[in-house]
Amino acid sequence: RYQLLPMWYTLFAQWAFAGLPIMRPLWFHNLGDELAFKHVDDEYLLGEDILVRAVNRPGMKKAEVYLPEGQQWFDFWEAHGGVPQAGGRVIPVQLHDGHIPVYVRSGAIIVKKIRRRRSTGAMAA
């Protein structure tokens, strides 16, 4: 979560200066996407580019994720983004402990702050 701190600062600035919500319903950026209205109870967008599927029941083993239409989406947790998923459809997702389905919109730039590793060898140099 600390790696995404620059994104959080940007989202809070958008809220402070333009009144845009930080957590947005799926339909917020596309009112014509009727399927987005059916998933307001278990999915949301962080800003415009990150989709989060909430795991809202203990012991859930699978879930369905609706990817909004108009773009391709990449699994946030996959190395190098994994296989792109077409938007405008529902995909099944297997869940396991500690995993929350998160997807990133194609073309999005997600700025991360990578903390430098500290060691006694690096500190002596």
Image (cartoon, helix red, strand yellow):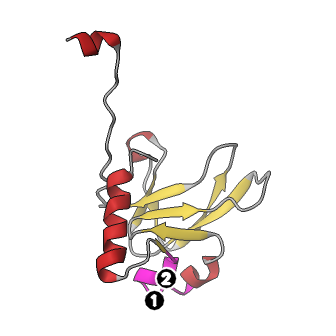
Residue interval drawn in magenta: 24-34
Examine the rendered structure and indicate whether residue 35 appears above or below residue 118: below
Taking the spot 40% from the left edge, 64% from the top edge, the residue there is 72
- Is residue 106 in view from this perspective? no
Near mark 1 (Cα within 10 A), the count class, few <14, some 14-19 or many ≥20, is few
Taking the view exactly as shown, the residue that stands out farthest to the left is 125
Residue type indicated by callout 1: Leu
Tags 1 and 2 touching, CB below 8 Å: yes
Location of mark 2 (residue): 27
Quadrant housing residue 31 = bottom left
Examine the rendered structure and indicate whether residue 40 appears above or below residue 56: below
Instruction: Name the spot of residue 32 as percent of width and height, x first.
Output: 46, 90
Which is nearer the eye, 69 or 96? 96
Taking the view exactly as shown, the residue that stands out farthest to the bottom is 32
Quadrant housing residue 86 = bottom left
In the rendered image, which quarter contains the C terminus? top left
Taking the spot 32% from the left edge, 73% from the top edge, the residue there is 14
Instruction: Name the spot of residue 4 as percent of width and height, x first.
Output: 39, 50
Q: Which disc number belongs to residue 43?
A: none
Instruction: Name the spot of residue 119 as percent of width and height, x first.
Output: 35, 16
Q: Is residue 30 found inside the magenta-colored segment of the image?
A: yes
Residue type indicated by callout 2: Trp
Taking the spot 31% from the left edge, 64% from the top edge, the residue there is 10
Near mark 2 (Cα within 10 A), the count class, few <14, some 14-19 or many ≥20, is some
Taking the spot 64% from the left edge, 70% from the top edge, the residue there is 42
Examine the rendered structure and indicate whether residue 7 appears above or below residue 119: below
Q: Which disc number belongs to residue 31?
A: 1
